[in-house]
Each structure stands twice: as C-alpha cells, then as structure tokens.
Image (cartoon, rainbow, N blue to C red):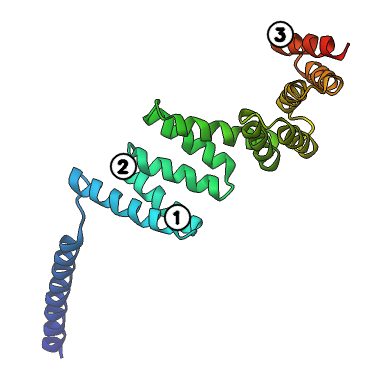
Amino acid sequence: MNRNVGRCFVLSIFLLFFIFSGLGYALDTVEIDYGDQNTVEGYAQTMFDQGYNLYQAGRYGDAIQFFIDATSSKPDFAKAWYWLARTYQENNMVDEAIWAWRKVIQLDPSNAQAQYFLNKMQNWKLYGKEAWEIYEQAQNAYLQNQHLPAIQLFEAAIRENPSLEVAYYWLGISQLKNEDYAAAVRSLEKYLTLQPQDKNAQYWLNQAKKGKK
C-alpha cells in the first residue's frame, strides 16, 4: 500500500512538472514583445485600420475602441488621434471630441482642420449643435453674398438659441447689406447689449442709423 502511494506521489510530481513546463513553453510561444518598436507600430496600425473600416461602415461605437487601442499602444499616432476625434464627433460625444481634438493639435499644431473642428465642438457645447450648425450655414450664405438666405438662417439660429450673440451681429450686417436699415439697427443694438465693447459693431450700428435716415 505504501509503495503504491509512493509511486502515485512520484508520478504526480512528474506530471505536474511536465504540465508546468509545457505551459511555460506555450506562454513563451504567444508572448508579444511590446518593447519591439516594429511590433508596437504594426499593432497600432492594425488597430487603426480596423477602426477606420468600422468608421466607414458607420459603426462608430466599435470604431472608437480600435482607435483607442491604436493611440494607447502608440501615443504619438496623430492620424489615429484624428480619426478618434472625428468618430467621437460623429457620435455626438462632445466632451470626448474636444479632448481628442486638443490631442491632435498638440501633436500637429499646424493642423487647421483639427483647429476648425475643435472650435466647432466647443461651440456645440456652448450653444448646442443645432444652433451652431444653422449659424455656420448662415455664414456660408453670407460669404456667397446671399444676404436674404443668410438673414433667414441667422434668424433661425437665434430662434434655436437666443444666447448665440454672434448671430445677432451677422444678422445685423446681413440686413445692412440688404439695405434693411431699421432691422439692422435692431439687431446690432441687441448684439451690443450682449457685447458692449465691440467697436466694429458700434461702427456698423452708426452706418445702419445713417442709412435709416
């Protein structure tokens, strides 16, 4: 009986040694050396490619996770940060988008598109997405000298958010260009109650008052 117990004990020790030796070998064969720069960049690029494909398919929530993996493994991966920011933006995750756009600009200070999107996100947060998008449409109409459509759009932006003070300014300027001087006076006076130190607005208000006479 004792001999059998002894044999079982020895056999158990041998099996345990064999199992743990094999486990160690198995772990060694799948281990990734993240200290290898080529391996890190390859992994980051793979995660980025997966994320971009998901973004193109409109699967923003899934894409975000892959872009996060890409930027986590390679923190200076500016392109991955750019598309992470875009995906947050498309998913209406405003605070996260602001954070990511700031990171893009930190890595690439000359990126004018990133600066534009950062400003957009900050204004979404301040005034609301709908109001700011209408305001931008109004600006585009104004820049194309389409003053009447611009007036209508600036008025719509103000209806969406009456605290969007810059819309009163450009509404007044558009009305002045459209030779509706009385309306321009009202809009610019309203703007100056919100921004009383704006000398440009005061100048255009005086011009509107002269045209009104």
Disc number for residue 74: 2
For the N terminus, the image quarter is: bottom left
Asked if residue 24 lies left or right of residue 105, the reply is: left
Q: Assess whether mark 3 and mark 1 are in contact (beta carbons under 8 angstroms).
A: no
Residue mark closest to the camera, 1 vs 3: 3
Give the Cα separation between the discs numbered 1 and 3: 45 Å
Q: Which mark is residue 55?
A: 1
Residue that appears at 76% across and 20% down: 176
Camera-side residue of 95 and 199: 199
What kind of element bears circle 3?
helix
User: Hey, what amino acid is under mark 1?
Assistant: Tyr
Which residue is pictured at 65% across the width and 40% down the height?
133
Hey, what amino acid is under mark 2?
Lys
Residue 160: where, in percent of width, then height? 77, 39
Which residue lies under the disc numbered 3? 199
Q: Tell me, yes or no, if residue 36 can be seen here.
A: no
Give the amino acid type for the residue marked by disc 3 in the picture: Lys
Instruction: From the viewer's perspective, tell me whether residue 202 is left or right of residue 113.
Output: right
Q: Residues within 10 Å of mark 3 (few under 14, many from 20)?
A: few
Q: For residue 111, say whether it is visible.
A: yes
| Secondary structure under the numbered disc 2 in the rendered image | loop
Q: Nearer the viewer, residue 169 or 146?
A: 146
Q: Secondary structure at mark 1?
A: helix
Q: Position of residue 38 (x, y in %)?
A: 18, 46
Left or right for 202, reference 20: right
Q: Which mark is nearer the camera, 2 or 3?
A: 3
